[in-house]
């Protein structure tokens, strides 16, 4: 994704194209390779050596993260800050060497789910074969996709809701132990590591979500040939 220099963070958040990455003049001067550093990132600010991240700021050497800030060497995390060497975490702060955590702070070398059920052990993540094609087939039915909430009824869900539903009882169990966003993110990651769907996609409009679901299904179908 394109990366531009903005005068300050306020100018960045008010940019017309919200997918563009941004850096400050000072950052650009200190790290002249900022454009290549952000080639696979989207909507990030002052990040360096990261890949396939979105909506992050001031992170270093992370991959497949979203909505994080001041983190380093993390992967598949979201909504975290000041963490390092973590993976598959959500809404944590100031943690180190953790995985599968949620809503934690100042932790180290943890493998837990949430504060409430942290003694339950490591999560069991179900796999959906050909996940993108199955999600696409599900949302093609009339009124099947509604991005305004996780679940509307048995036949209408948002994108993340459909992923959890298609995973069956294992998906429901994972959702109950964490939350819908985290469960869907984990199922997508394990079922399709090649075609990345960041959790920020779970908050698209229905129209945008449908287009991206179709894109993923087409990529998956082409890869299977």
Image (tube, rainbow, N blue to C red):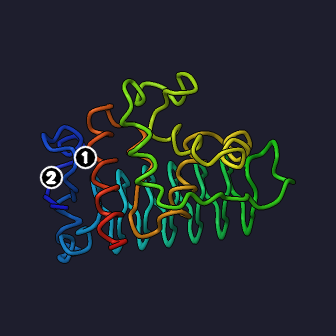
Estimate the x, y position of residue 44 in percent, counting from the top left: 30, 55
> In percent of the image, x 66 and y 58: which residue is there?
125
Question: Which x, y percent locates residue 208?
Answer: 27, 38
Tell me: 37 left or right of 164: left
Q: Can you tell which mark lies on residue 6?
A: 2
Tell me if 106 is positioned left or right of 12 in this view: right
Give the structural element (helix, strand or loop) at label 2: loop
Quadrant where the N terminus sits is bottom left
Residue 15 in the figure: left or right of residue 56: left
Identify the residue under disc 1.
9
> Is residue 80 depicted above or below 151 in this figure?
below
Residue at left 53%, top 61%?
Answer: 129
Image quadrant where residue 99 sits: bottom right
Q: Work out which quarter of the rendered image holds the C terminus and state it.
A: bottom left
Density class for disc 2 (Cα within 10 Å; few <14, some 14-19, many ≥20) is some
The residue closer to the viewer here, 152 or 80, is 152
Q: Are marks 2 and 1 in contact (CB under 8 Å)?
A: yes
Task: Count all numbered tags in the image, as a single digit.
Answer: 2
Relative to 216, 167 lies left or right:
right
Vertical side of 223 occupied by 220: above or below:
above
Q: Which mark is residue 144?
A: none
Q: Is residue 123 above or below residue 141?
A: below
Q: Residue furthest right?
A: 119
The residue positioned 52% from the left and 68% from the top of the image is: 74
Compared with 41, 137 (above or below) is above
Mark 2–mark 1 Cα distance, whole angstroms, equals 7 Å
Dot 1 lies on which element? helix
Quarter of image, res 46: bottom left
């Amino acid at each position: 994704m394109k990366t531009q220099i903005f005068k300050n963070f306020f100018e960045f958040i008010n940019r017309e194209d919200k997918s563009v990455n941004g850096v400050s003049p000072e950052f650009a001067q200190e790290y002249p390779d900022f454009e290549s550093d952000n080639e696979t990132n989207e909507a990030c600010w002052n990040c360096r050596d990261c890949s396939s991240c979105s909506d992050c700021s001031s992170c270093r050497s992370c991959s497949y993260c979203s909505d994080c800030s001041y983190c380093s060497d993390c992967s598949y995390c979201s909504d975290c800050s000041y963490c390092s060497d973590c993976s598959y975490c959500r809404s944590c702060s100031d943690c180190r060497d953790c995985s599968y955590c949620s809503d934690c702070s100042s932790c180290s070398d943890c493998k837990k789910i949430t504060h409430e059920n942290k003694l339950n052990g490591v999560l069991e993540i179900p796999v959906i074969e050909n996940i993108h094609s199955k999600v696409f087939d599900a949302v093609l039915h009339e009124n099947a996709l509604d991005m305004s909430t996780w679940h509307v009824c048995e036949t209408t869900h948002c994108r993340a809701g459909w992923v959890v539903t298609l995973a069956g009882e294992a998906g429901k169990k994972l959702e109950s132990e964490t939350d819908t966003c985290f469960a869907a993110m984990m199922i997508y990651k394990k079922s399709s590591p090649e075609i990345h769907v960041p959790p920020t996609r779970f908050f698209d409009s229905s129209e945008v979500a449908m287009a991206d679901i179709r894109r993923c299904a087409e990529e998956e179908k082409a890869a299977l040939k």
